[in-house]
């Protein structure tokens, strides 16, 4: 593993380049640091195994730079810092802090991004030492989400996560916490400190937003109930950010969802109806991308959105198979799904892996992966959401999996049974309909297990209803 000496970090923008520029229009000059702890993690009291570090420091740094670039920051310098023992006051050792103080001053750095969780005290101390704004990984992701959220629901979710994060960091916002308000006369008591007042004001906002999000949750629940009345299955796309979910979504549905080679290009979920090769109709849902060490507050804030994944009949795990970190990214996605309540055993029964971006591989590697996909547990499909390679096979597999538990039935209705005909059209998939000379219509239809009990109740006494061979 590579460690970068802060003394050797070089600016990518010279002083000459900065002369004459309007500072109000110039992006913040940013230093990105990726601390790597060398101390071995303690075994949990529960005895559960400690998750191994599967991602290389260089890959972590590259991802942090990508996150910073996603909101237009000017990355002047970056590096990996090996930390033998984290310090409670600054995370970094005294010597590192002093070295980086000189670098920040020499390179005229406005913002330092530390790709690691920082306590409020650590953040405050580093800001004082370096005389620059500090953002840890959680703060950076919150900034991106705040910049990208478009819908009212998305903005509410981001604001809730922001306020919850801010509430824990009030310690760094005030230098006059000894000031007191309230108290009447000599016996009125010390009153309320400024930090207590601010914390209470934030809690009021948090409570209000949670009430609004509860309403969003109820609305989404009503929408799901409405969709259940239509015999369409729900297919949810999940995956690491920038795995190509939105591009795949656009290719399959013909939609124009924003799809860029950028982390968190899409935040707000989108749903579209699709028709599979055999005529089966389904609803495809594009969700927010996951990321390693996704802040718990964000998972909680976006739970109303991510519940679409919980309710899905089928989950497509889209992976960037051309990335060297594909396996580590897949593990991160599985961990987030587990936090949402989707266990590994359950995910195997209703999940398909989509190995995307095979067009970026050489032919030998692509052929090797196609063979591996055929042997993968639960099924995997090599595709390119750009060229369309492998998508016909994927769509056929989706239809087969969705219809695996369905029952095919043949039934004949008389011309006057319009109500029953209407029920069939609303609750089953009509495969064919043939009308004879007397006006009677024979339907070949497919009915899901969820509708089978209702079908049996309505058509139990009809001898014409029979399972199709």
Image: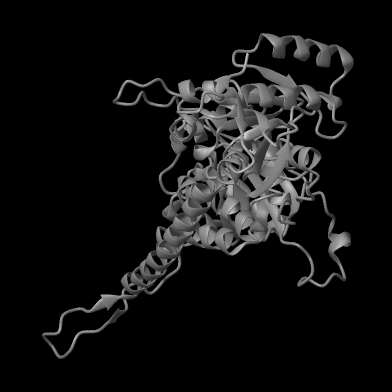
Task: Give the x, y percent position of residue 196.
Answer: 31, 70
* Residue sticking out furthest to the front: 438
Q: Can residue 314 be seen?
A: yes
**Which residue shows up at 70% across the image and 44% down it?**
273
Q: Is residue 109 above or below residue 412?
A: below
Task: Give the x, y percent position of residue 172.
Answer: 44, 63
Task: Give the x, y percent position of residue 164.
Answer: 43, 58
Q: Indicate the quadrant containing the N terminus: top left, top right, bottom left or bottom right.
A: top right
**Which residue shows up at 71% across the image and 14% down it?**
373
> In the visual, does 249 lie left or right of 123?
right
Near-viewer residue (187 or 47): 47
Near-viewer residue (404 or 390): 404
Q: Exactly how many numbered labels are in the figure?
A: 0
Q: Indicate the quadrant containing the C terminus: top left, top right, bottom left or bottom right.
A: top right
Q: Can residue 169 be seen?
A: no
* Residue sticking out furthest to the left: 187
> In the visual, does 8 lie left or right of 12?
left
Q: Is residue 201 above or below residue 11?
A: below
Task: Give the x, y percent position of residue 87.
Answer: 44, 42
Near-viewer residue (248 or 168): 248
**Which residue shows up at 53% across the image and 45% down it?**
229
Q: Is residue 70 above or below residue 193?
A: above
């Amino acid at each position: 593993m590579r460690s970068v000496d802060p003394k050797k970090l070089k600016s990518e923008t010279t002083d000459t380049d900065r002369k004459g520029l309007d500072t109000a229009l110039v992006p913040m000059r940013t230093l990105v640091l990726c601390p790597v702890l060398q101390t071995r993690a303690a075994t949990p009291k529960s005895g559960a195994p400690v998750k191994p570090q599967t991602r290389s420091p260089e890959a972590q740094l590259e991802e942090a730079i990508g996150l910073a670039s996603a909101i237009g920051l000017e990355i002047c310098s970056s590096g990996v810092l090996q930390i033998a023992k984290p310090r409670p006051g600054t995370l970094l050792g005294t010597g590192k802090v002093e070295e980086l103080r000189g670098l920040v001053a020499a390179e005229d750095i406005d913002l330092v991004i530390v790709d690691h969780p920082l306590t409020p005290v650590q953040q405050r101390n580093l800001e004082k030492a370096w005389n620059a704004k500090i953002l840890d990984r959680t703060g950076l992701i919150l900034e991106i989400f705040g910049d990208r959220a478009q819908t009212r629901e998305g903005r509410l979710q981001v604001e809730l996560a922001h306020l919850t994060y801010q509430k824990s960091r009030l310690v760094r916002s005030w230098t006059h916490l000894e000031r007191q308000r309230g108290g009447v006369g000599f016996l009125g008591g010390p009153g309320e400190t400024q930090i207590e007042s601010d914390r209470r004001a934030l809690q009021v906002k948090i409570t209000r937003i949670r009430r609004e999000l509860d309403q969003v949750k109820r609305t989404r629940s009503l929408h799901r109930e409405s969709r259940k009345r239509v015999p369409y299955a729900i297919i949810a796309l999940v995956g690491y950010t920038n795995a190509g979910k939105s591009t795949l979504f656009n290719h399959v549905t013909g939609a124009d969802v924003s799809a860029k080679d950028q982390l968190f290009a899409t935040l707000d979920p989108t749903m579209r109806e699709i028709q599979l090769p055999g005529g089966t109709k389904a609803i495809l849902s594009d969700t927010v991308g996951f990321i390693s060490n996704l802040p718990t507050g964000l998972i909680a804030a976006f739970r109303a959105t991510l519940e679409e994944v919980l309710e899905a009949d089928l989950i497509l795990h889209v992976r960037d198979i051309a990335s060297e970190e594909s396996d580590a990214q897949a593990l991160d996605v599985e961990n987030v799904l587990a936090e949402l309540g989707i266990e590994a055993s359950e995910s195997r029964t209703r999940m398909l892996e989509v190995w995307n971006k095979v067009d970026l591989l050489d032919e030998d590697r692509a052929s090797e992966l196609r063979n591996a996909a055929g042997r993968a547990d639960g099924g995997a499909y090599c595709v390119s959401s750009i060229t369309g390679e492998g998508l016909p096979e994927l769509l056929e597999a989706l239809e087969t999996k969705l219809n695996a538990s369905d029952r095919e039935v043949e039934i004949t209705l008389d011309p006057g049974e319009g109500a029953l005909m209407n029920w069939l059209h609303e609750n089953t998939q009509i495969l064919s309909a043939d009308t004879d000379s007397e006006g009677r219509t024979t339907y070949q239809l497919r009915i899901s297990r969820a509708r089978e009990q209702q079908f049996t109740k309505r058509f139990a006494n009809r001898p014409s209803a029979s399972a199709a061979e």
